[in-house]
């Protein structure tokens, strides 16, 4: 079954170009011209990924991200004419998985869409019955879900991938560049700051005391502590 991509932008020329390129790659594509229409299409079209413009009428791309903060298995690539690191951080803090600044090369956008969808498809070779346990924190690689105290954690695709990688290799120190390569599967134009933002979001969602599962190795990167540290 073809993967579904929703393209959202108020510039018809950009929407047409992106949609045409995606369809040529075999994706099923739908489009929207503003944030309100995009939210409606999410409910009816049920995309696997969204290419989402930031500056739009009615609801901005940031607003759409806020409304979809508890989404599951929908990857988001933000588009914007701005090139300020603050704008990138805002988008990533709202749960976007990737970020591109206009003007951009269609081929690069296609590569990022492919990488994002590939990550969503990966099961990591585990069977659905396998579980990673840290006390009351449980991660199910096969079904791409995580629970804390029996309640499902609402993680974005990249947050889940990052958590799974770190918990699968406790005490292994990952440099930020390594995490970008393994989780994003490509050199990430947003820089290593995106790793810090995703770690911060994970810690916030884990809360006390489980936010301490993810340790900062200053000047290097991050690691997970051993599972036995939590009863």
Image: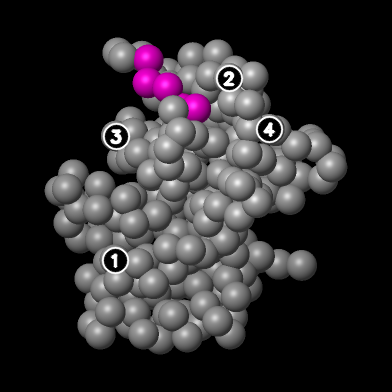
The label shown at residue 229 is 2
Residue at horizontal 20 percent and vertical 53 percent from the top: 87
The label shown at residue 127 is none
Q: Name which of mark 3 and mark 2 comes first in the sequence.
A: 3
Which element is circle 2 on?
A: helix
Which element is circle 3 on?
A: helix
Image x and y of residue 60, in percent: 26, 73
Image x and y of residue 37, in percent: 40, 86
- Mark 3 neighbour class, 10 Å CA radius: few under 14, some 14 to 19, many 20 or more: few
Which element is circle 1 on?
A: helix
Residue at horizontal 32 percent and vertical 50 percent from the top: 93
Image x and y of residue 21, in percent: 51, 65
Residue underneath mark 4? 133
Question: What whole-number distance in Å separates the C-alpha atoms at marks 3 and 4?
Answer: 28 Å
Mark 3 vs 4: CB contact within 8 A:
no
Q: Is residue 149 above or below residue 199?
A: below
Residue underneath mark 1? 62
**Image check: 84 left or right of 51?**
left
Mark 4 vs 2: CB contact within 8 A:
no
Q: Name which of mark 4 and mark 1 comes first in the sequence.
A: 1
Q: Relative to the observer, which residue lies in front, 79 or 73?
A: 73
Question: What whole-number distance in Å separates the C-alpha atoms at marks 4 and 2?
Answer: 11 Å
Q: Relative to the observer, which residue lies in front, 20 or 165?
A: 165
Q: Is residue 95 above or below residue 167?
A: below
Residue underneath mark 3? 193
Question: What whole-number distance in Å separates the C-alpha atoms at marks 3 and 2?
Answer: 28 Å
């Amino acid at each position: 079954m073809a993967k579904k991509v929703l393209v959202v932008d108020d510039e018809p020329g950009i929407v047409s170009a992106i949609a045409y390129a995606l369809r040529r790659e075999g994706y099923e594509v739908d489009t929207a011209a503003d944030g309100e229409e995009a939210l409606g299409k999410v409910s009816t079209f049920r995309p696997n990924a969204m290419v989402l413009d930031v500056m739009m009428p009615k609801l901005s791309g940031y607003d759409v991200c806020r409304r979809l903060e508890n989404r599951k298995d929908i990857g988001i690539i933000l588009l914007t004419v701005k090139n300020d690191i603050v704008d990138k951080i805002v988008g990533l803090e709202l749960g976007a998985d990737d970020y591109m600044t206009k003007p951009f090369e269609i081929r690069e956008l296609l590569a990022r869409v492919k990488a994002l969808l590939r990550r969503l498809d990966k099961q990591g070779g585990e069977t659905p019955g396998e579980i990673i346990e840290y006390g009351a924190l449980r991660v199910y690689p096969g079904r791409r879900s995580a629970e804390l105290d029996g309640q499902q954690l609402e993680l974005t695709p990249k947050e889940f991938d990052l958590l799974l990688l770190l918990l699968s290799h406790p005490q292994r120190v990952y440099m930020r560049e390594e995490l970008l390569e393994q989780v994003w599967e490509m050199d990430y134009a947003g820089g290593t700051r995106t790793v810090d933002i995703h770690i911060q979001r994970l810690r916030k969602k884990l809360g006390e005391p489980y936010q301490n599962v993810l340790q900062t190795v200053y000047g290097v990167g991050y690691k997970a502590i051993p599972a036995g540290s939590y009863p």
